[in-house]
Every structure is written in C-alpha cells, then in structure tokens.
Amino acid sequence: MEITKKMTDNIIEVRNLTKKFGNFTAVNSINFGVRRGEILGFLGPNGAGKTTTIKMIIGLLKITAGEVVVDGMDSVKFRKKIKEKLGYMSQKFSLYPKLSARENVEFFAGISGLGRDMVNNKINELKGIIKKDLINNSVSKLPPGIKQKVALFTSLIPDPEILLLDEPTSGVDPEMRRNFWQDIYNLKKQGKTVLVTTHNLDEVEYADRIVILHRGNIIVEGDPVALVSKYGVDSVETLFKEAVKKDERD
C-alpha cells in the first residue's frame, strides 16, 4: 500500500474527527493541524473532549467519523508505522505504580526493543534526571513532580518524533510545572513536535499555538498573543473564559 504525502507543514492533520458514545457526541467533527516542530496547547475544561481526541490520534479509541493523518499516513491504515513516530504520556496511566522508577524504565525500554546495553544507558540517563536515592523507590511513593519526570522520560525512550502529553502537569505544584514545561520546550529545540492538553491557563505562554475545545467543538484556534490582540482582551485566561461563556449561550 503506497503512502501519499501532501505538501503541508502539518505533521498531524485532524479532519472532521468525530467520536460518539451511543447518543453522546464527545468530539464533534473537528479540524486542526499540528505543525512540524511546534508546541500546540490543547485547552479546555474537563470533559471538553481533549483526551478523547488524543486517544483517537494514537489509535486507543476507534474513530466514529473523519480521519487523522500523521506524517502523510492515515492513522487507521498505517497504525503500526505511526505508532513508531508517537510518544504518549497519559493523564492517569503512564507508569506502573508498584514498580520502581528503574523497573519502569527497564520495562518500557524492553518493550521498545532496546538491548541490555541500551537499557543500562537509559538507567544511567535517569540518574541524571532524578536523585539516585529515588531510582529504586516505587513510583507510588515518588513526589508528583518526580513521577511526571519519570513518565516523560519513559515516553521518550523510543525517541519519537511526536509527543502527545495528556494533562502532564495535573496535580503538580507551580514550580515543578514550570520546570516540566522547560523540559518540553527543550524537546521542541531538539526538533520534537508536541501536542499537550492542559486546563492550566498559565502554561499557555509556552505554546506556539492553542486550540480551545469546549463540548467537543473547537471554539478558538491560533497564536495566543495574536488571539489576545484580535479579541481585545487582557490575557488568554480572559479569552478562554469569554469564549466558553459565549459557546454556552449559543
């Protein structure tokens, strides 16, 4: 089967993407793109459809209608090839809590096909990221910020081109959130493409573009600085609140 790539800057294209659970429409025929090498902030209140969208992109949820194209490949037809390009950090399940940080790295490195020497290299890299005395602690006993660092590290083990991060800073204190976003920004400088969902509006300054999702629909999209100017508001937070209120009235 031939892969046909269109001339586009988008490494991910979401076209008329829809997800229904019975009579409930969680994602309603949305369209957006993620440009190669950018950080796209996917914003919205809880239940807006952010996680559902990410899971359809990855292939964890069946698409009801529409399509997702990753690097020119249909996400359904070329699922295996696309999986090699994606790194995923879920909101609720990224690590095995009863295993230590070391054991999680060994497990994820193993299923990624790394040999013993490479696995040892990854463990040594981990020692440079978290304190050595924490490496053998069970993940359930790690502080939230350290746990998120380990989760991000494991998602990068296969060296994916694209990272999909679902609420990566949920439950983390402001300082750790800033540090975590610096890690994300450094990944962008390495050429990674990052799609990150969040409802923490103070994190928007790190994103190149934002998409605001509400009740399964995209209600705002664009460069955050340009959007603030366009709508004549003082901040993205104000823009977000006004856009959600307007959508609820319509």
Image (spheres, helix red, strand yellow):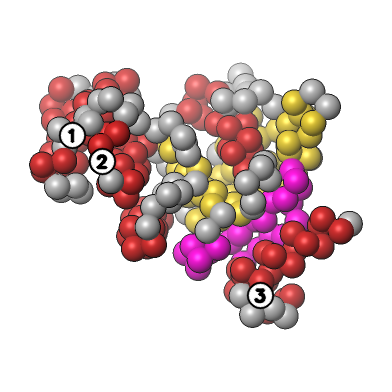
The answer to whether the residue labelled 2 contacts the one labelled 1, judged by CB atoms less than 8 Å apart, is yes
Q: CA distance from mark 2 to mark 1?
A: 7 Å
Q: Amino acid at mark 1?
A: Asn
Using the image, tell me which numbered label, if any, was put on residue 228: 3
Residue 122 x/y as whole percent: 19, 35
- The span picked out in magenta is 201-223
Q: Nearer the viewer, mark 2 or mark 3?
A: 2
Q: Secondary structure at mark 2?
A: loop
Residue 145 x/y as whole percent: 32, 50
Q: Secondary structure at mark 3?
A: helix
Q: Secondary structure at mark 1?
A: loop
Query: Going from the N terminus, do you reach mark 3 or mark 1 first?
Result: 1
The answer to whether the residue labelled 2 contacts the one labelled 3, judged by CB atoms less than 8 Å apart, is no
Residue 107 x/y as whole percent: 27, 23
Q: Which residue is mark 2?
A: 142
Query: Going from the N terminus, do you reach mark 2 or mark 1 first?
Result: 1
